[in-house]
Image (cartoon, helix red, strand yellow):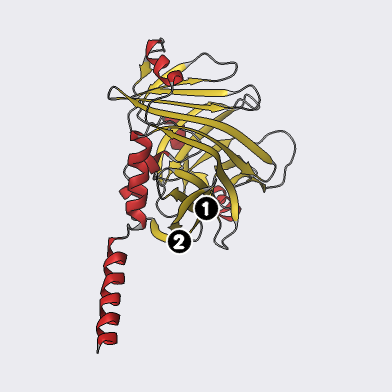
Amino acid sequence: MKQFIFLVSLFFAVAAQASESPTAKQLLQNMATAVHQRNFDASFVVMKEKGMEPYRWLHALHESQELELLSLLNGAGLEIVRVDDKVTYFEPQSAPYSIKTDTIAGPIPEVLFKDIAVLDQDYDFVLGGKGRIAGRPAQLVRLESKDSGKYNYWLWIDTESSLLLKAAYVNQAGELLEQLQLTHISVTPEPAQQLVELLSKDFPDPVDLQNVVETDKGTANWQIDWLPQGFALLKADRHKLDLNNELADYYLFSDGLVEFSVFVQRPLAGKRPSGALSSGATTVYVHNSGAFDVSVVGKIPPQTAKSIAESVKRAL
């Protein structure tokens, strides 16, 4: 009898503990809160098939103001500074400019630091196993796409600080295509002096970006008959491409987590076969229809990019 009572007590204790464990969605929400409220200094690398990109990422909450700095450490460099809802970009061979937003557009999808409920319709939130990343205890959270034509996104979250330790784009076979791996992270009670000094610097006035679809008359020439589940048009315009100075109609689509772009232009000189190039999770698919060329660029599978490109037609 005593043994039976012990087993029953043990069962309810384990059940109670399980019920108190955070869900995958709660872990992501905790991560978003931690990123906005903690003082930290982190280094990470983005690893693709053909190399890696090293970054340094600092954040602080100082006198009710959020301060953030993201720096690309290779090549000519890229530096992005955020002071509350003002983000300033310092890019090579370009004048600095600011936009009005409360998140930096970097290697980590911005939605993960905002309201992830917008992903409910297109992704499942799944708890994975536990392990150690960068010497710290981590919990895997999987964002599994409900559409097999898209990639999944996996995150390993620090169980102590709730900060991100690792992230990866994963195909439907479970293969990691592109990874973001922290190599160092330091969480401190006080903000880094380098961030506090941002408050004494002058930055360009921000351009207020509105979350609306921007279109012009030129882009009404085309219709895209097929899109993966959940993608909607964010922007459409006509501009010259930096690569060849050719005029192209441009469309930007997003499902809340990832984006892809579609460019439609007149055929370039010389017959080129249609085909795809991939680097990590990013695909570039070029389709030669004969009358016009279509290029699709984004973190989507090659077959998905191919289907999008081949669905582009002249508007009736």
Badge 2 amino acid: Gly
Does residue 1 sit above or below 96 in this rendering?
below
Q: Is residue 221 visible?
A: yes
Q: Position of residue 291 (x, y in %)?
A: 62, 41
Q: Quick one: SS at disc 1?
A: strand
Does residue 91 sit above or below 213 in this rendering?
above
Q: Position of residue 40 (x, y in %)?
A: 43, 32
Residue 128 image label: 2
Q: Position of residue 177 (x, y in %)?
A: 60, 51
Of 147 and 192, which appears nearest the observer?
192
Q: Quick one: SS at disc 2?
A: strand
Quarter occupied by the N terminus: bottom left
Task: Give left or right: position of 139 versus 133.
Answer: left
Q: Position of residue 64 (x, y in %)?
A: 27, 25
Alpha-carbon span between mark 2 and mark 1: 13 Å
For residue 284, which quarter of the picture? top right
Of 148 and 267, which appears nearest the observer?
148
Q: Which residue is mark 1?
A: 132
* Residue at 44% over, 49% down: 157
Badge 1 amino acid: Arg
* Residue at 45% over, 17% down: 97
For residue 266, which quarter of the picture? top right
Label count reads 2
Task: Give left or right: position of 151 versus 246.
Answer: left
What is the residue that sits farthest to the bottom in this orientation? 1
